[in-house]
Amino acid sequence: MNTKEIESKWQKYWDDNKSFKVVEDKNKKPYYILVEFPYPSGAGLHVGHVRSYTAQDAMARMMRLKGYNVLYPMGWDAFGAPAEQYAIKNHIHPKEAVKENIKTFKKQMKTLGFSFDWDREFSTTDPEYYKWTQWQFIKFFEKNMAYKAKVNVNWCPNCKTVLSNEDAAGGVCERCGTKVEQKEKEQWMLRMSDYAEDLLKGLDDTNFADRVKLGQINWIGKSTGVELDVNIKDGGKFSIFTTCIETVYGITFFVIAPDGKLIKELMPRVKNKDEVMKYIEETKLKSNMDRTELNKGKTGCLVEGVMAINPINGKEVPIYLGDFVLGDYGTGAVMAVPSHDARDFEYAKVHNIPMLQVIDGDGYDENKAYEKGDYLIDTTAHLINSEEFSGMTIIDAKEKITDKLEKLGIARRVNNYKMRDWVFSRQRFWGEPIPMVNCPKCGWVPVNESDLPVMLPDVAEYEPTDDGESPLAKIESFVNCTCPKCGGKAKRETDTMPNWAGSSWYFLRFMDPHNDQEFASMENMKYWNKVDWYNGGMEHTARHLLYARFWVQFLYNNGLVPHKEMIWTRVSHGMVLGSDNQKMSKSKGNVINPDDIVNEFGADTLRLYEMFMGDYTMDAPWSVDSLRGCRRFLDKVIKLKDKVNEKRGFTESLLAIQNSTIKKIDYDFTNMGYNTIVSSLMILTNKYMEMESITKDDYHLLLVLLNPIAPHITEELNEMIGFSPIVNDTWPVFDPEKIKEDTFEMVVQVNGKVRGKEKVSSNISKEEMEEIAKNIPNVKSYLENHEIVKIIAIPKKLVNIVIK
RNA sequence: GCCUGUGUGGCGGAAUUGGUAGACGCGUACGACUCAAAAUCGUAUAUCCAAAAGAUGUAAGGGUUCGAUUCCCUUCACAGGUACCA
């Protein structure tokens, strides 16, 4: 059989018949299966894409056969730095590069037989799409959720652009690996931190995998504690945030951030100005450098001339500068309790600051800090040296001390979050222009809705400028405009959006992709309800998912989408590694190109292999041998056709095996057990192979069950035995009656070890089981001269005889 | 460091609520077919023992249980995430 011909034949059939086109049909139950739409890179489709697209494709095909109205769409996430870099490098306009790459991707996807509804395809770079991304940005602005602020931003000197905290994780540029610098710039920001609590709570309304939920929770980074006002001797005050108010009596100093506001305010009173200034400057440099390992030492200096007063007992304590305190987290100042915090402990050691123990317990060790992690699990832990709170347990003390401070009006219970506002500006050409106009009279004014989209100008110059301004800033025809409000001369915003913008709501657009009145109609969104299965890489479970959820929650709060969470289940697939067990990369030379595999083995074999290679959620290495085995399996299925006969060689257990296969596959589909779906199909095939002959219906059943994973070959074989296309068929129903067996193999254990097996009737009693068990010769020999202590009989399974 | 995940034959991996560990596939060996090879088919394949019987065995150690790959504790290794977050 010629795989190529068969594959293109059926691909054409599906295309011609629009087999996968889906329309909103109230009579059918909707089911929305989504895979992360790819960034169409110049490298083409990766075998990793094939893994997740095949899995979701199989799910989509199966659900269609079960009668669901399945939405399985595909589109392109084509804005962003990589597309622009690629364009610059290859001297081709990003628009053209994207067009070319999409063509390649789409062709590859078609040769793999993915059942996408191509009528819903779009790219984030289509003006018809980014019009609505801009429209939604204006909503953010109107609701005071978008604002422009001068902030310290992560600046990549190589890419010449601003990076979000997420993009600069680890202190290096996510794209090029260059060390990130700090730079003060005016940026558009989205008030994502306002949604921290809602984003946490919203997780309860989702069915995300636990590890995905945890990723979200960690990123949001909530901590509950107390904000405490601290007076400065001779006037002034500041606040600190702590999660360990129970240690308040142990404060021996305060530490404030060198990049914070407080030190600037205190400056006139500082005696050692030179030293302080020097340290502040050093910190600025340091944040340009690797802040991870080299600078973990507890550097800093005493701020001479000012003393703080511990609010709980009026003791005077010194203030230090230290760069381990961050200016933009909490209040930019901390209370330091060296006896009970490892960082404070180290700092105190370096700077010779006295310590004061205020909690005692069994785990106390004077050579290190007796910390939260230690004393909270220590049942003997209690306060000491803490006036009226001495002797109390930690939990009590926490409450009582907070109460007291609250009554004094100098403390508040607050939550802090690591998650900051979203830096939304990029100084790049290839992104959605931010639809704002700066008018000398009216300030920032959004572009009129009727004037959307603000199109990217068609120019040849799109490389970033050296001064960090967007390339758009050089294009006068773009910049100069009139104010939408007063009609006066004004200037257009030249920053563009990050590529996370377009991907934050694309799943909504798929529900209504051609709507030119709204980003998607409420009617359609209500029909599709939610994304039932969303699959993507683990690397996107923190950021992309968080941005998308934030975006949706904002739309929901403004009545624009039907649910606060629009994604029900999020799963992530494991990576496909090279055959050397390493991540595939050009430099390692271990990259597998799906086209080559399709050419040599066929699309069905590749699909089958990628499903069979291992646990779907885990990484798995590439193996050509295993791939060949999958081809061999398909050849076996082809060969089975010769066994098709009017009658079958009767095998009583066949119906049972068929039905348990259906049951197993149904179960596995809902648990992403794709590898065991394949193995149970192999078992069924082996069973058929053993038989003299099988009927058309037997064969048809196998073909339907295999169809979601290997759709081409199964359609062809199915046609050859005279059935109408599987794509219009129905999924077999599991019949529990058929798997009832009259007998089972009873396992007999003695003291938990298997000593015998016996085929017995399924409906015998426990007593009968025990009796038969005791009389199996081998078992009997173990029982001799021993006392039977007890017998455990599990119906339809085993008997365990416990002897002494 | 912290968080998360993983650890099962020569290899990829199964084992749905604690109940026959190693399904299925790969590889290997032998056999059939062939002048020969490939392909295909058959048989075997955790380890120890000539074989049976048996013993050992799911990273290591301990525990709970009639029974543990599965639950609990301790330790180790690997992978990913995160990093002075108060």
Image (tube, coloured by chain):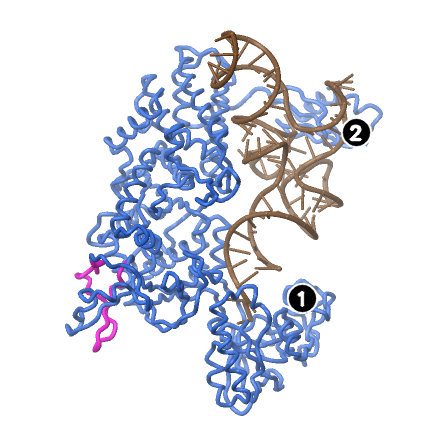
Looking at the rendered image, the quarter that the N terminus of chain A falls into is top left
Query: Which residue type carries mark 1?
Result: Tyr
* Residue picked out by circle 1: A375
Q: What x and y, as percent, mark residue A116?
A: 31, 38
Query: Which residue type carries mark 2?
Result: Ile
* Up-down relation of residue A667 to residue A438 (above or below): above
Residue A549 in which image quadrant:
bottom left
Residue drawn 21% across the image and 60% down it: A454
Would you say residue A546 sits in the magenta stretch?
Answer: no
Q: Evaluate whether label 2 is on the same chain as label 1.
A: yes
Q: Earlier in the sequence, mark 2 or mark 1?
A: 1
Is A325 situated left or right of A706 in this image? right
Q: Can residue A522 be seen in this snapshot?
A: no
Stretch of the chain drawn in magenta: A432-457
Q: Nearer the viewer, mark 2 or mark 1?
A: 1
Q: What x and y, as percent, mark residue A737?
A: 49, 24
Q: Tell me the CA gap for discs 2 and 1.
A: 50 Å
Q: Nearer the viewer, residue A34 or A282?
A: A282
* Residue picked out by circle 2: A788
Chain colored blue: A
